[in-house]
Structure formats: structure tokens, C-alpha cells
Amino acid sequence: MNTATKLSGFALGLAAVFGAAYGVGQLTGPVTVVATEHDSDGVGHGGDVRDEEAGHGEGTAAGHLPGGLLVSDRGYTLVPVGAPAGEFAFRITGPDGRPVTGYDVTHDERMHLIVARRDLSGFRHVHPELAGDGTWRIASPLDSPGVWRAFADFTPTGGEPLTLGVDVTVPGALTERQLPAPASSATVDGYTVTLSGSPQPGRTATLTLTVDRDGVPVTDLEPYLGAYGHLVALRRGDLAYLHVHPEGTPGDGRTAPGPQVSFATEFPSAGAYRLYLDFRHRGVVRTAEFTVHVGDPGSTTGPTDEHASAEPEDGHGTPGHEHD
């Protein structure tokens, strides 16, 4: 990947950011997959956006859409399949309709599976295993009731990088989780990660994340998937997706292993975004989370006394867990 990967996938032509349609309630029944041919809904999972050019996977409007909004793109389709309780499984079918079995290694893995609830809680970044029949399997990262968005981030052999997305409903009692307020710091397992930078829509900006542990700068971050940090951004409402890697590469002779990790970013649209930074130290991968309001003159990511905890609010998930 280029040393400066931009958040340039977000489309200017999409509608304004919609609020997440969550309320206190009950979801019943088995895990349900909601997957339209071109699943790019704006609120919840009830609708989809179609384009006359996007006919059954043979061509799509993906050049005008953010990543992860489509279940089918350029002939490739994300197809969840039945799996035993506690397991999540899916296939990628190709232009010929058959399961894809050939994938390029990208950032040390052939498949990156990212999941988040539609209220932007419960984020996980994991790496399933590929079976000979083209089925990807992993212990289910969907650990609480709600409507989840699952993103498959991959490069088919001989093809271009793709990110496909599908909604999955996990039954059970559901309580809305409000998006945390913007804050410049997040804490996880004794680590404090500070975010600095002032992103504005339509402009390239550098976001820098600085990692401290118990007040001491961490200068020995460990490579994780070929980098010192990985940043995923999801836009509130439609969950437009971008997987971003930092400037520089471990071992290139000029990139320090912390405490700072910088990303060249570009947010073409205003709105609220949730950022998730994965970093590894002392053999454990942790995730620091931030809310950023792009285009809000009253909101910056400069130094502040606010802190946003990366600990889960209801006990679901395990902060500081090592990613699969």
C-alpha cells in the first residue's frame, strides 16, 4: 500500500448523514442476514440504493460510492452462509458465480473482516480462515444483539481491492447506544491515545495519534499487519467505510515505532465519523476509538481535557483483546 493512504473513498454525492435508527426494543429470531443486490442503505437496514448501471454485479456505481455500501461490486458478491452457533461464515462469489478461492495477501492477510453495530459500537477487526470450498469461517465476532454491518476487505487474485458489506441481525434485547461526544483522547488498558489534527471536508489533512502508557510515551510499538497502526473510519448513518494505513513502513529506516503514528486523510463530506485505531504493544493488539465531527467549526481534535474511554459500556467485548 502507498505510504500515505487517503480517506478518499467517501462520495460527495451521497445524501447527508442520517442518524442511527436504534431504540430500546427486542430483536427476536435467529441471526438474520439482510443483503440486497446493492445494499447501500442510509438508515438501519431497510432500504437499498440501486443504479441502472449496476446490473447484478456486472458493473456498479462503486466509483461513486464509499467502500462497504455494496454487497456486490465488479462481479464479486459477499454471500453469508449458514454456520453452527458461535461461528460466522461467508463466501465471496466471482463474476462466474462460483466461490473465489484465490486471494492476494494484503497487509499480511488474505481477508480482513471488520464488524460494527449500526450504532457504531462493538467494533472488531478479525481474520477468518479459508476452507478449500471458498468458505471463510471464524468464531463469531458479533457479540451483542443488534443490527451489525460486516465488511469483507480483500483483493481477489488478479483483481482490484474491494470492500463489500452486508447487514446481519443478532436477536435479543436491544438498547440504543448514543455516539460518544468528540474527544481528543481515548484510554484502553492503561494506554492513552491522543488524536490531533483538524480534518475538513474536501481537504487533505494529517491525523496523528500519540500512544502513551501510564504517562510514558510508547516508543516500541510492534508491527501489526505490516504497519505500526491501522485506522478504520465509519460514517454515522450509512457506515461508509475506509481502512487506512499510516505513513511509513516498519523497517524502512525512517519510520519510528511510536509514540506517534500519522495518517494522511481526506474527508470529502461533512458529518460525524467514528475512528478505530488498532495498535500492538507487548504482543497484544488494542483498539482506541474516537468520534470526529468533520466540518463542524466548533469541534476540533486539538488538545483537550476530555477523554473517551475505549472500554465497553455494557460488558460486551474484551478491551485489549488480541485480534484474530
Image (cartoon, rainbow, N blue to C red):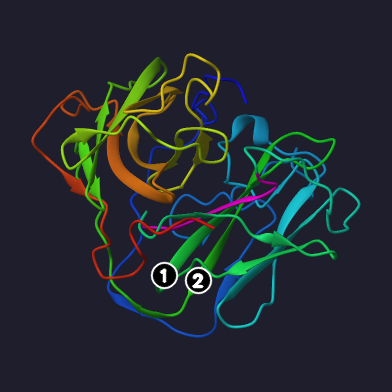
Q: Residue at x 70, y 36 (%)?
A: 161
**What kind of residue is marked 1?**
Gly
Residue pointed to by mark 2? 169
**Mark 1, secondary structure of its residue:** strand
Magenta segment boundaries in residue numbering: 109-119
Q: Quadrant of residue 263?
A: top left
**Mark 2, secondary structure of its residue:** strand
Does the segment drawn in magenta span residue 113?
A: yes
**What kind of residue is marked 2?**
Thr
Q: How many marks?
A: 2
Residue pointed to by mark 1? 146
Q: Which is more toward the observer, 233 or 323?
A: 323
> Quick one: which residue is furthest to the right in this view?
96
Task: Work out whether 32 lies above or below 213.
Answer: below
Q: Callout 2: 10 Å neighbours few (<14), some, many (20+)?
A: many
Q: Earlier in the sequence, mark 2 or mark 1?
A: 1
Q: Which is more toward the observer, 199 or 262?
A: 262
Percent position of residue 293, x then y: 27, 34
Asked whether, in this view, residue 6 is left or right of residue 213, the answer is right
